[in-house]
Image (cartoon, rainbow, N blue to C red):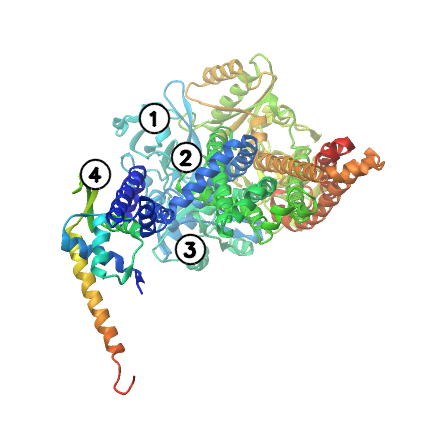
Amino acid sequence: MIWGRILDAFRRRRLDTDLEAQLAYHLDGLEAEGRAQGLSPEDARAAARRAMGGLTQVRDAYRDQLTIPVIEPLWLDTRYTLRALRRNPTFTVVVVLTLAVGIGANTAVFSVINSVLLKPLSYPRSEELVALRHVAPGAGSSALNLSPSMFLTYSEQNRTLQALGVWTTTISSVGPTEPEQVRVVVVSDGVLQALDVPPAAGRWLSAADQLGATRPLPSIFKAVTTVMLGYGLWQRRFGGDPLVVGRTIIFDARPMLVVGVMPRNFRIGDTEPDVIWPVGFDRERLTLAGSSAATFNYQAVARLKPGITIEQANADVERMIPIWMRSWSDGPGTTSQMYESWKLAPALRPLKDDVVGGVADMLWVVMATIGLVMLIACANVANLLLVRAEVRQRELAVRAALGAGRGRIVRSLLVESVLLGLIGGAVGTGLAYGGLRVLVALGPTNLPRLSEISLDARTFAFTAVLSVLSSVLFGLIPALKYTGPQISAALASLGRTASVSRDRLHTRSVLIVVQVAIALVLLVSAGLMIRTFEAIRSVQPGFTDPEHVQVMRMFFATSVVNDAVRATRLQNDMQDKLSAVPGVTSAAFGSAMPMEGFASNLGVVNSGSVRADDRPDQASDPLPPRLFKYASPGFFKTAGTRVLAGREITWTEVYGLRPVVMISENLARELWGTPRAAIGKHLSQGSGMPGHEVIGVVEDMRENGLDQPAPATVYWPTMSSYLNRTVAAPTTIRQVTFIVRSTRAGTEGFLNQLRQAVWSVNPSLSMMPRTMREVYDRSLVRTSFTLVMLAIAASMALLLGVVGIYGVIAYAVSQRRRELGIRAALGAQRRELSGMFVRHSLVLSGIGIVIGLVAAAALTRLMSTLLYGITPLDPVTYVAVPLVLMMATVIASYVPARRAASADPVEALKVE
Amino acid sequence: MPREVLQGTLDLMVLRTLAAMGPQHGLGLAKRILQVSEGLLDLNQGTLYPALLRLEQRRWIKSRWGVSDNNRKAKFYELTARGRRQIREETENWELTVALMAKFLVKPAGES
C-alpha cells in the first residue's frame, strides 16, 4: 500500500487530471438524468452538484491520498524554507558560515580524538595488549622498565600472559654505499608473538634468531645475523621487492640476512621501525639489574590471556618481583636490599594508554574548548533566528490565523533550523577535511598515531548528530518564543509599539550573557596557555642560539671499529674534520643533547649514583640516582653552555684515561655548596672505582624538556676504563650526537659538506641531521599545539561574542528609534543616547564576566597539567581577560549606539 | 431517513458492486450502490473517487480508460484477484460481526 502511494505521488499531475475528467463525466451524467426527469437545466445542474457533495473536500481527500505520509509535509516545509533562505542570502550565508566554522572545528578535533584516543590500536585483539612497567617510588622513578633478568623471570614464571617480550630502539646505517641512517627496534623473543601482526613477506624472527643474537653485554650487536625490514625502508630502498627476503644486506659494515618484511603501518609502541633486530640474553651472565652495564632499559609489551584483567596481571607481576630478587644477584657481596628500598611495584596499563598517554589531557581540553565555541555559535545563530522570527512575525500570525496549529508552525521553524544546521554541517565537514590535511601535514610530529587521522563513519555520525542537536537547540528558542498563544495578539499590535518585543529582547540579553561567560572561559584558557608559553620560553635551556647548532646522531658500531681507542681516534678525526668545514666555529660530540629524547643509551650506563669522597655520610646505599652523560672536549663551548668554574676535559686526558669528570651546577651546589668549591673534589661510584676529580662545573641543562627540572648530571669522558664501575679495558660511547656550531646550520649546501666530511672519515657511517632549534621546538610542541588550538578557539569566541553584542544592541536601537526620536526631540544629548546603549551592553557583559570568572576558576583546574610556571588562577590572566572583554563590548556596542544618537528626530518619528 | 456511509463500509460496497456488475465507471457504480441501498444510504457521490483511488493503491481494483454507452471517454474500474480475496475476507468479517451483534440485540422476552 505504501508503495502504491509513493508511486502515485510521482504520477500526481496525471491523476489530478484523471479526477477532474471523472468528476466532469459524473456531473454531466447526473445532469442529463435530471433533465430527463423533467427538471430545468439550472435545477438539473444544482441537483447534480448536491448529489456529488462538496467538490473541494473530494479533491482534498483525493490529494491527501496522493501524498507520502510524514515525508511529504516535511518535504513541503523544506522546499518552502529553501526558497525563503534563498531570498535572504545574507542571513543564510552568515548563519551557515557561523555553523560551518563551529561544526567544522568540532569535527576536526573529534576526528583527531577518534583516531588517536578512541579507535583501537591496529593489532589483532588489541585490547589484550599491555605495556608492562614498574613504579619505584624509592628510586624516584614513576616508569621503570625491565632488566633482561626480569624479562626472563617474568616470561618463565607468569600465569597471566600469553606472550611477553622486551624491546628497545637504536640506530644503524644501511649500506654499503652512501649509507642511510635507519631506526632500529631490537626485539626479544615474544614481542612479535604478542603483537601478532603477520609479516607482509617472509617470516617473523624466531627464537633461534634471538639465540643467535645472544651476546656478551654490553656490545649487544656483535652476533646479530638475521633481520626483518619495516615497510617504509622496504619500499624506499628496495622498491617493495619481495625477493629481498633471503638477501643479505649491509648494516654498519656487517652483513645480515633478511628473513621477513613487516606490513605497512606496523608499529612497536609508537615507533615505526625501519629495521627489526633480534636480541637474546645469556642466562649465565645476567644479574639483577642486567649486567652492571645495562640498567632497566627494556620496554615490555605483553598479551594477556583471554579473560585476564589488568588487575590480575598486576597481582601476578607483584608475585614475581620477589622471585626475581631471589633468582639473581648483582655479584658477590651484593644484596637485593637496594631494590627492596626502591619499593618496586608493577604498573601495567593498556598498550593504547602507553602510546597515547601524554596527549589525552591536551586533546580533551581542546575538544572541550571547541565544544564551548560551538555553544557560542549556537547562541549567535539563535539570536539571528530571533531577529528573523521578529521580521516574520506577521507571516507567522497570518498562518496561525488561517488555522495552522502551533505544532505545524513549530515544525516549519524547526525544519528551517535543522536545514541550516545540516547545510552548516556539510560545509563544516569540508572545512574539517581541509583542516585535517593541514594538521597532518604540519601537525605536531610527536602526536601519536598522527598518520591514522581520517574522517570515518563515526566522525560523520558525530557531525550529523552535532548538526541536528545544535540546530534543535538554537531553533527551539525562537520556535517556542514566537508560537505561543499570544501569537494572534501579535497580529493586532504588529508594528504599533515596541513593548511587545520586551520579552524577546530579554531572551536575547540572556543569550549575550551566556556568550560572554563562555568567551571569558575560553579567553582565560588561552591566556593561561600564552602565559605558560612565555614562562617556558624564558627558561634557560642550558645552550644558546639553537638555530646555529647542527645536531647529528651517529652510531660507531663495533663492526665498523671494534677497538675503543681506535673508535675514539675516529670520533676525534670526525670532530676535527667537521670543525674544518667552512663556516664552522666549533664541533664536538656527546652522548646526547638535551631534549633529543634518547631515553636509553645502550651499552653505556646513563644513570647511577655517585658518592663524594670527602663526604663520609654518603658511604652507604641508597644514594639518589644521577644522570650520566658523556662529553667530548669542546662540547660545552659548542653547545653554548657556560662553564661556571674550572674547565672542559682535554683530548690528552681522554686518551690518558685520566679519572676526571665535570658536573652540573645543581649537583655541585647539592654536594659542595658552590660551583667553585666543587673544583678539585673527587667522586666515584664506589666498588673499587677510583675517585674522579671534578675539573669543571657547567650550567644546568634541561635534559627532559623545558618544563621539567634540570637533572643533577655527571659528565664523564667519552672513553674510560671505569664505565662499568670497575676497572676494565677502556670502553667508549658509540651512539653519539655530534654538534656543529655554524651560522650556516640547516642549509642544504652545509649539510652536503657535513655529509662529505663524515664519509671522508669513514664511508660506512651515516648521520641524521637536525638543528638544535628543531629539537627545541619539538620539545615545546605539546604546549604550542595546545596554545594554537586554544588561541583559535578563543579568538573565534571573542569574534562571535562581539558579533552577538553588536547584533543585540543594533536591534535594540532599531526597536527604540521612536523613543529615541522623542528623546532627541525633547533635547537629549547624543552622548547620553549612545551612552545609554553602551551602558546597557556593559551591564550585560559585566554579568557574563562575573559568571564566566566563576566558571573559569572551576574549569581551568582541569588543565593544570598543561600549565607551567603559573597557577590555574594566574592573576595576570584573570585581570587582563575581563578588561579585553569590556573593551570589546564597548567597541561592539558603540558602533550601533552611535547610529541611535545620530537618528534625526523627525525622520525617526515619521517612520510610523 | 437515509443514513451516511458507515466508516469502512463503502470499500466493501464498491468491491461487491464491481464483483456483481463487472467493469464499471464511477457514475455507474454510484447509481448501482444507491439503487441497491433502496434509499437507505445518503451518499455524497464525489467521495467515491478518493475511495476508488485508495482501493486501487491497495491493488484490489484496477482501472483503464474506455468508452461509455454514450460514446464518451470514461474510466472503468474492475476487480483484481486480490480484490476478490479481499471481498471473501471482508464478507466473513461482516458476517461474524453481524452474527455477534445479533446475539446481543435479541430482545429478551418481556422487554417491550
Read off the residue under disc 3: A327
Position of A89 compared to A764: left or right? Answer: right
Position of A44 compared to A351: left or right? Answer: left
Kindly tell me whether residue A218 is visible in this rendering: no
User: Tag 1: Cα neighbours inside 10 Å, few (<14), some, or many (≥20)?
Assistant: few
Q: CA separation, marks 4 and 1?
A: 78 Å
Residue A624 placement (x, y as % from top left): 61, 47
Labels 4 & 2 near each other (Cβ < 8 A): no
Residue type at mark 1 is Gln
Residue at the spot x=58%, y=16% of the render? A744
Q: Which mark is residue A235?
A: 1
Residue type at mark 2 is Glu
Read off the residue under disc 2: A272
User: Tag 2: Cα neighbours inside 10 Å, few (<14), some, or many (≥20)?
Assistant: some
Name the chain under label 1: A
Residue type at mark 3 is Ser
- Chain-order first, disc 1 or disc 2: 1
Residue at the spot x=53%, y=28% of the render? A737
Q: Secondary structure at mark 1?
A: helix
